[in-house]
Structures are given as C-alpha cells and as structure tokens.
Image (cartoon, coloured by chain):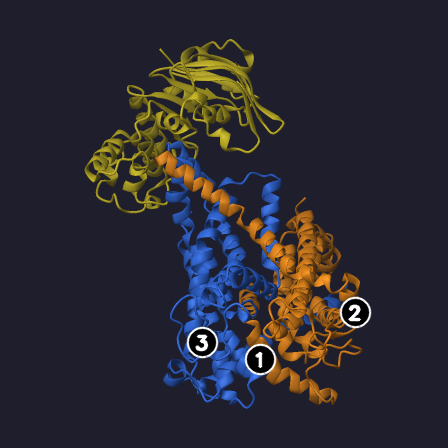
Chain colours: A yellow, B blue, C orange
Amino acid sequence: MVKISVKNLNIWFDSTQALKDVSLDIYANEILSIIGPANSGKTTFLRTLNRLNELERQFRMEGAVDYDGVDIHSLDTQILRKKTGMVFALPLPLPLSIFDNVAYGSRMHGIKDKKILLEIVEKALKEAYLWDEVKDRLSTSAFKLSGGQQQRLCIARTLAVGPEVILFDEPCSGLDPISTAKVEQAMILLKETYTIVLVTNNVKQAARVGTRTAFFLSGEMVEIDKTERIFTAPADDRTNDYIEGKFG
Amino acid sequence: MRNSQRSQKIAFSLLFSATLLIVVPVGLIIVLIIQKGIPAIDWQFLTDIPRKGMREGGIFPAIVGTLYLVAGAIVFSLPIGLLAAIYLSEYAKDNALNRIIKLAIVNLAGVPSVVYGLFGLAMFVVFFKFGASILSGSLTLGIMILPIIITASREALESVPYSFREVSLSLGASKWQTIRHIVLPNAIPGILTGTILGIGRAAGETAPILFTVAAFYLPKLPKSIFDQAMALPYHLYVISTQVPNVDEKIRYGTALVLLVLVLFMNLIAIVIRYQFRKRKKW
Amino acid sequence: MRKFKEFIIEKLILLCGLASIFFVALIFLFLLKEGIALFKYVGIGEFLFGKKWYPISEPPQLGILPLILGSIMVTLGAAVISIPIGIACAVYIAEVAPSKFKEALKAGIELLAAIPSVVLGFIGMVTLVPWIKQVFNIPTGLTALSGSIMLAFMAMPTIVSIAEDAFYSVPKTYKEGALALGATHWQTIYKVLIPASSSGILAAVMLGIGRVIGETMAVMMITGNAAVIPKTLMQPVRTLTATIAAEMGEAVVGSEHYFALFAVGIVLFVISFFINVVADLFLHQKKV
C-alpha cells in the first residue's frame, strides 16, 4: 500500500536547485533508507514531506506529494505534521522537563487531562525504550539526559503525537555506537506500527535497518530498490562506488 | 621596529587616557551625588510633601508621580512593543515593509525628547483633550520608550534557537502555539531586561513631561489619571533653576533619589541578564 | 475556535508591527498640524533666517537663526571634543583593554548612558559652570563652551558603543593577516581596523551628533539661554531644544508663539530624521 507518493518533485532555494525531478513511492510499514553524500538533497526531500522546508524564505517547489492519495498542500499543515512525525539530526529536547517534552505535542492538540497525558507519555517512552531509565525523574529537565537518551526522548516525543509516518533525519549522527544500536533497535520495532523514512549518511545503518534503500546524488535520485539489491547488485555504477566508499 | 613599538606604547597610553577622560568623571559624578545627597535623605524627605516653596519638606509627591507615570508608560508600551517584536522576529519577511519598520524604529529612538513633549502636548493634551495629566504624560513616555522595548524584545526572541521552533512545528503545533509556548517563555529574561531599561529611561526623562503632565508645585497626591502630578526629574529641574535659595542639600538629595531609582532599574536589568546567561540551557 | 483566536492574535501582531511607522507618522503629522499655522504670519525664509527671536514682543519677531546657530555652535563644540575621545575609547575597549577591565569600562559607559540628563545638567551647573567662569575669568560660566563639554560627555555612550560594535564586526582574518605580516598591534589598528570599520564609525559619529542636537534639559540648564547670534564659545547661547522646553510652558495655545515653537519642533524632527536615515544607510553598507 502506498503511503506517500512523490511525483516529479523539483525544489529550489533561491536560485539553487536542491532536488531534481524526484519521483518515488513510500509504502506503509516499511523502512525506506535514503543514503547519499552531503548536499545530495536527502534532508531537503525529508523536510518536503512534512512541509518544514516552506519555512525557508527562498523556497520554491514544483511537482506533487500525495499523502494517502491526497495532495499535502490541500491538507491542514498541522494535521499533516501530526501524522508525519520528525526526529532531527541532533537530539533537540525542548527546554522543558522530560514529561513536558513528551506531552508537548498532545497538549498543543488540545489534550489537557493529566491522566490521559500520563498514559500517552508512558506509552511513548516505553515505545522508545526510555521509560525504565527516566520513569523516576519525569519532572527533571530534559537537558539532564545523555545524548542517546535525549534522542530517544525525541523519538518518544514524536510518537506521543500519534503519527503514521516517522521521518528520521540522520538520527544517529551525534551518537556513540551503543546509543546508535539502541535507536536502530527501536526503529526496527517501530516499523510494525509506523512507516519510516530514514535519511542517513551511514551506509551500514541503511543496510542494517532498511527495507528498501534510495540513493540520492546532487539532488537526483539515482536509484531505489530493495536494500539487499542496492547493496549486492546496484543498477548504477555511482551507487556501487558510493557504497564501496569511493566517494562520500 | 623599536620605533614602531614606541609609537604603539604612546598610542595605547593616549587611548587609555581618553577612556579615563570618560569613565573617571562618571565615577566622580556618582560619588559626588551620593556624598552630598545622603545627608538630605531621611524618612521625612522621602515621605513628606514639599514645604515652604519647596525649600523644606520632602519629595514624596514627586516620587509617587514618577512611579505613576512609569507604570502608565509600561502598561501602554509593553504589550505593543512585545507584539511588534514578535512581528519582526517571527512574521516579517525580508522585504521593503520590514526595512521601513526598522527604519521607523530607529527614527522613533532618535526623535529628540523635547519633540516628544511637543507631540504629547498637541495630540494628548490639546487634540484628545486629556489636558496636562498623568494619562497624557504616560502615553507620551510610552511611545518614547517603545523602541527600547521593541529592540530588546526582538533580540531576546531571536536568540531562542531556530531549532526549537522547528521541533514544535514538526509536532503539529501552530505558529502561534510555538511562539506562545516555546519562544516567549525562553525570551522572557531579555524582554524583562528591555522593559526595565525602558522604565529607567521613562523615570529619568524630563522634556517629554514638561508640557504634558508635570506640575511645578502640587503638594498633594494625584487622585486619577486625569490629574496633573509632580515628577522627580522635573522637580529637580525646578529646584535647581526656578526656585532661588534652595538648600544645596535638598537639590543633591533629590538628584540622589532620582539617580538611585534609575540606576537601580539598570542594576536589576544587569542582574537578570547575568543570571540568564549563567543558566542558559542551550 | 482556536483557529479564529489565532487569526485575531496574528492580525494584532501585524498591527503592532506597523505601530512604529504609525507613531513616526503621527508625530510628524501633529507637529505639522500645529506648526504649519505659523506660516500664515511669517514666511519660511523669515522664520529660518530671521535674526531676531522676540516671541513676546508686539508684534512678535520669530526668526530662529540665533537658535539654529546656537545649536550648531554647541553641537560643533561637542563634536570636536567627543569624536576623537569617543573613538579612542572605543578602540581601547575593543582592542587594548584586558578582558576583565573591559567589562568594567563598558559598565561605566552604560552607567553614563543611564544617568538622566536633568541630573547631568544639575551636576554641570554646580561643577562645570563655576569652573569655566573661574578658569576663563568671564562674567558667567553659563556658556556655549559649558554646553559643549557637557554634551560631548553625554554623546560618549552612543559613539563608544556603536563604534565598538563596528570594530567587532571587522572579520578576524583582516587583523590576523596584518599581524602575521609583522605589523604591530597599533599599526594593525590604524591601518586595517579603523579603515575597515569606517562606515560604522561614521554612523557612530552621526548618531552621537543626533544625540547632541536633540539633548534638552542639560543644555537648557547650563548654556545661559540668551537668544542672540553667538560670536564666541564664551558667551551664553540658546539652542532649538532649550527654546521649546523653556517657552512652551508660557506660550498660549493657538498663539503665533505656540505655532512657532512647533515649527522649531518640525526643524528638529527633520534634522533627526535625516541623521538617523543616513546613519542607518552607513550601518547597512557595512553588512554587504
């Protein structure tokens, strides 16, 4: 089942073109990894899906992005963003307590009941494998957590809103290997319930968790296929060169 | 080489003397006012009305008048200034209108204080028929400190990391919710600092209140916002230049009270700024 | 419902965003409204270049040339004193002072900016004025010179802080490049740093002058307020600002005198507008 369908997407910031004619489908309950060197347009692509790019002043876009068959521009931005949660490259806790971080989205969507909020927070923290580590100090500042914990807190915060799709933007770039493993483990389990788009510059990570993998280069999508296939028999030489580390 | 070293030495000592030329008098002025003003300060001076043609008694009505004026100015200009700052930091696009607004703020800050007085007289006292009153004076001072509040609040808002806004929006919060729950709470120390500096400025200004509110001699407290009032800076002007044979002690005492009020505001602002920097979480 | 509330709030924000423009326009309009009536009685040329300011004689003579010259004289005097000292101080704070000392100096300058002008006027009256009288052995110390010194002092915070910002905005690489070539610190300052920040320094000077022209209370208290065309710095003068402050209290609303004081206000507004716009241009040039 196609969850998000992108057709002929072109994006410019000012006069620089960041994405060139990208078309791809994202299926429900898959992990789609997007790999590619810096400035290949991966993050721009991701931020198109929840319309976060549009905050930039010089942003211009052509083409269509459909969510469940509906053009995202005909959806209410807040509802779209509620359905497509995002986890950023660096752990970005808000300057609030652990509890308030996780409850933030739900509160903004009008949930005020303390008991319901507590349930939501507990469920989200459990899903992100953080509950046991923080359950006794929910009211302390989120900045007191370690980097890996902070990133899992951010995942929990995203889950608490009740998204259908989760957009990960290089979520492990600031983390050590152990924290990375924990985040990846969480991702694989989340796939059961959510659709995941993972932008990463860590090729091995894509190989470990991706159902399918897309390779981006200079704003173009070079190819997209099942992860095993991309890593064993890519159709394009450039993909092969990148995966083997000949450039990056 | 040795020559250039020597000229550097000379140049730096000249620069240092220039700096002393500014800073030392500041210190001397403050020491002088404190030294000569303290003997005048007692309970009666602070709580009594002026007596015997302002040559004796206290300055209580002037203190109260200044507090009323400052409170009025803040009530008027804080909401407008804060919202204006939010507009500039969160909504304004990089276009001509934005340039014009910024230029208007710069100009508002540059208008001579006595011109504010004229404006207040023409608009509030005469046109709106508020008369010389606390209302007219507060509104005039309020407009005068608007640029201070806008500029400081804007800086405070802009210093909140952009990523916080992105996170909040990505969770489906609306733009206003993001401002209200994330940006504003984290900008409060800066906004407070600006507000307090505005208060200090409003408390010390004389020219804008000359024709809009200030009473030469009014030995009672104002009862409503439509009453005239005495004010500390104007009172100091009056007893320094308009009333002969006022004991020097009273003049210095009045100057000291005004100075302490204004510097105290600045001190609070500095403390808040310092505390904030120390506790900054990002 | 929430959408509606937010719609209202966002409109309110826009409205307040425009408030500054509105107030500047309002100030100008009200000055114009009250000031323009003067020109029914007096020609613009006669007003600006008339040599006699006798507002309460019959008929009143409303020439502001003595006031303009008074303002110019005091301002020039203040500029001559404050520009070199102010810039030197900015250089010292930005480049030479050890970092702990730097904070103390900056605090001292901020302190100066915070002292109300009426307090400085009072201090000038009791210290500077008698001193001038004694040193120069003149009949009164209430002179243009006293005003110039006091105003120079009051312009310092503006000049120092803006010039200092200008120095900080010079890219570090410029300085490092010059130092690497073997220039002394001082050579680097006057050959690289000062030229590179010249537009910022110019803006600092202009805004300092703007502050001086607009200053009212201190000037009124120590310049003697004689509305005659000044010949030397050693005589009393009367500035545009002091004229308004001193006379508006007595002027009858709707009289020629009242209109004339508003016309003086227009002159001041136009001068400050011009200064601020030009200074702003200089400050923006820097960023390109």
Q: Which residue is mark 3?
A: B62
Residue A179 or residue B166, whichever sits in front:
B166
Q: Residues within 10 Å of mark 1 (few under 14, many from 20)?
A: many
Residue A3 or residue C209, whichever sits in front:
C209
Q: CA distance from mark 1 to mark 2?
A: 32 Å
Which numbered disc covers residue C50? 2
- Dot 2: element: loop
Percent of width and height locating residue B277:
44, 56
Label 1 close to label 2 by CB (< 8 Å):
no
Tell which subunit mark 3 falls on: B
Q: Earlier in the sequence, mark 1 or mark 2?
A: 2
Specify whether residue A29 is in view.
yes
Q: Residues within 10 Å of mark 3 (few under 14, many from 20)?
A: many
Q: On the rendered structure, is A189 left or right of C182?
A: left
Q: Which residue is mark 1?
A: C122
Q: Amino acid at mark 1?
A: Phe
- Dot 1: element: helix
Q: Quadrant of the C terminus of chain A?
A: top right
Q: CA distance from mark 1 to mark 3?
A: 17 Å
